[in-house]
Amino acid sequence: MYKKFYRAFSQAPSGSPSSMLHMACHSHHYWPDVTLEATRQYWHDAALLADEKWGPIFQEKIPSWQSAVAQTLNLPDAGQIAIAPNTHELVYRLISTFNPSEPLHILTTDGEFYSFTHQLRRLEELPNVRVTRIPRAPYATLAERFERELHAQDYQLAYASWVFFDAGVVFPELVRIAEQKPEKTQFVIDGYHGFFALPIDLSRIADKAFFTAGSYKYLGAGEGMCFMSVPRHCSLRPLNTGWFAEIAALDNRSGKVGYADNWLRFAGATMDYSCLYKGLAIFDLFRREGITVNKIHRFVLAAQRRFLHSMDNADHPILNRKHLIHHDLEQGHGHFFTFDCQSAENAGRLQSELKTRAVLCDKRQQLLRLGFAIYHDQDETYQQVFGSE
């Protein structure tokens, strides 16, 4: 149904990698065809306009991107959506707002993505930083345990994922927890594995929580265009800051370090905007074709059910419900399944075996992940995954 929008499938020669069953799409989605012309258009604008390109980028392109993101997440103020090349830059800019001479206590889980986990481990080397990590499992009690701890101590920062990157499990009740957080706690939601995959409504917590995501995974626009929604009336002053933060006042700078009262408060500096063009092209394509996040999610849910049906009939030694970390589609699940292969060696062997059957997937240590996308065939039975005819 949606495969027609992807050049990787429509023009790939038989037997090429892009003609395979691409099930690593929770990491890197194939780019829709419109991104090729968008890249050309960015080159044309940058080469033709030179320094004059900043006018259209800041006055037209960025507001269009912010508006599309705000509409997707039901955010009331598109002007509060900060952009950067990656989410780590944005999150660390937020962390830099805390006084380095005062205690910093951070609440998170044991299942956050590598960049945040790595950054926390480095911060913990400082004498004033303490980190409390709530175990994800059992998932059924995660919300209760996380919320209880959030209110039990004085936390300056709380951070959790909407969908855990390694397991695909949705963090239950995250909006309600953020809505009822202590007033002085800055709350951050890593939404990368939920954005443009799961229907997300942030209207209740737009002024209570920061939400980060980007274009790399489910939107399919490639690396380099990430965002963070910022609560209105935010007065935090990042130590890690760039010239964009006061770009509107460059001609009238005072002696004080200034910050804009919108998304530019968390802005950095000059970046490559080709991904902005690609992202806008995809938003425009989906709008023209009536492709919404709800439709995408329904399509993927149907694909996941077909996969589970094929899996249950296959009797595979590893790809089965015993090793599948989570498969309750009704209670909330990301757009990929994760199998615990018990060891990194088992996961590596299975990944190689699947590749010989023209199935591309990825692994994280002993975990093997299989993703689903709208460019999979509607009648896909996934038999090639299990080696069945």
Image: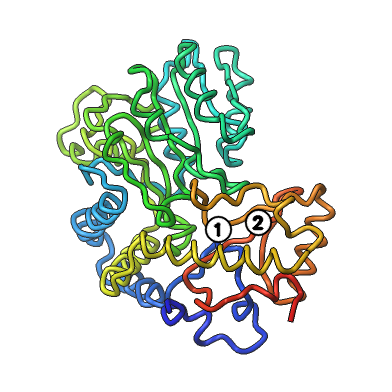
Residue under label 2, please give it. Answer: 369
Disc marking residue 147? none
Figure check: 241 above or below 384:
above
Residue 319 relative to residue 130: left or right: right
* Residue 30: percent from left, percent from top: 51, 70
* Residue 128: percent from left, percent from top: 55, 12
Q: Name the image quarter holding residue 139.
A: top right
- Residue that appears at 19% across and 26% down: 254
State which tag comes first along the sequence, 2 or 1: 1
- Residue that appears at 46% across and 59% down: 218
Secondary element at image label 1: loop
* Residue 253: percent from left, percent from top: 19, 31
Residue under label 1, please give it. Answer: 26
- Residue that appears at 20% across and 38% down: 250
Q: CA distance from mark 2 to mark 1?
A: 8 Å
Secondary element at image label 2: strand
Count of picture labels: 2
Figure check: 104 above or below 62:
above
* Residue 219: percent from left, percent from top: 42, 61
Figure check: 140 above or below 63:
above
Residue lying furthest left: 252
- Amino acid under disc 2: Arg
Give the crowd class for mark 2: few <14, some 14-19, many >=20 residues within 10 Å. many
